[in-house]
Image: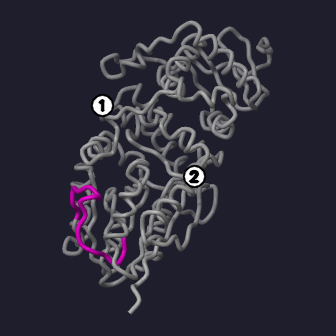
Amino acid sequence: MRTAEPRSATPRAAHAATAAVDAARWPDVAAPPRASRARIAVTTAVVGRALEQLPLRVRFADGTWTGRGGPVLDIHDPKAFYGRIGAQGLVGFGESYMAGEWDAPDPVAVLTVLAGNAARLIPAPLQRLRGLWALRRPRAQRNTPDGARDNISSHYDLSNDLFALFLDDTLSYSAALFRGFPATWDLLAAAQHRKIDRLLDLAEVREGTRVLEIGTGWGELAIRAAARGARVTSLTLSAEQRDLARLRVEEAGLSDRVRIDLCDYREARGTYDAIVSVEMIEAVGAEFWPVYFRTLDKRLAPGGRAVLQAITMPHDRMLATGNTFTWIQKYIFPGGLLPSVEAVDQTVREHTALTVTRRDRFGAHYAETLRLWRERFTERADEVAALGFDDTFRRMWSFYLAYSEAGFRSGYLDVQQYLLTKENPSP
């Protein structure tokens, strides 16, 4: 039920859409797919009822509001907002933000409430009919060898300069490990090194260790492993990352110890004492999880140690949404899918001779990492624009960082460090 806005209420934020959307670059944002009147009516009723029950204060352009109070969600264009959700579900919700049809003074707070109530936003009967109304993931995003190259390139080959604007000097694009909260920007690089060093310690990387890294990033882990005296082979599918990582390795004087190849994990050769893979499994896809873990098993020498850092989601939500096409998959990480802890355990158990020896979770640290990235990205918006990224891209990227931070703050998402071991065969 909507209520008239009290006179003492805080004025609504100005409409966020300050520039026209480039229809050639953002066709579905500029002209969203249309839903039938019946579907929009159902969406309006279902979403409206959900908003009434949430600890939010939802304000509409006509001065009415709904919700039980809490972080403010401003819906500037209700017709477009409900229409997009009716046509595209959560993809439409994100596109509506990109178009400026809704906004929030504190998007993370609003998205944290939504993430924390994700399983209850849609009534159970409609949840059971998800296959009839949810968008299906396009086959073009399958993580076959060719598909994986395209999927990785679409995100990581955007621009090294873009990532450098909001990452710290280590260029680490994964959860840091802080000593305490709240974290500050000047502590981020040290926290990233703390995370990397913990991974290398778990893998027992030292002088002479043969290390395979699956997912190079921009080379910081390979550099730190080589500085310990290890010999590192690192694999990436991003040409932009490979080129900059090679340059950074050369500048560190470690080219004789680090080899960086543009290579799919399925094409890896040789055996290694240690394998390290940081937040790469999210790009593998459930179809190929068995292949990924069998690769770890095959490439790891007897007595070796494989260490993974993985973002995870609840198992029931993974099962319910595993085939659904999401906003993140459409705009940020095509082909991406987060595993659950149960899915990792089951895949390792059923497809390898490896043992999950240890697992440590630290999701709160990812929330802080994302906050620092998001704030930095916002502060440097003019420099992002100077690189050629338009207003719609900047809203999209801000939404992605806020959306991800909210997932960790709500507990819907978590991040794990895994130690997998491989026993020596009996003499």
Quarter of the image that includes the N terminus: top right
Q: Residue at x 64, y 14 (%)?
A: 42
The amino acid type, in three-letter code, at marker 1 is Gly
Q: Where 333 falls versus 268 (above or below)? A: above
Residue toward you, 197 or 122: 122
Q: Is residue 246 left or right of residue 201?
A: left
Which circle marks residue 368 in the picture?
2
Secondary element at tag 2: helix
Q: Residue at x 41, y 25 (%)?
A: 392
Residue toward you, 301 or 204: 301
Residue toward you, 257 or 148: 148
Q: Residue at x 71, y 24 (%)?
A: 51
Earlier residue among tags 1 and 2: 2
Q: Where 414 falls versus 345 (above or below)? A: above
Which circle marks residue 27 in the picture?
none
Quarter of the image that includes the C terminus: bottom left
Which circle marks residue 388 in the picture?
1
Query: In the image, residue 314 lies at what x, y percent?
Result: 60, 49
Q: Range of the magenta residues?
A: 260-275
Q: Is residue 49 left or right of residue 343?
A: right
**Does the magenta segment cover residue 273?**
yes
**Does the magenta segment cover residue 43?**
no
Callout 1: 10 Å neighbours few (<14), some, many (20+)?
Answer: few
Residue toward you, 199 or 381: 199
Q: Residue at x 39, y 67 (%)?
A: 276
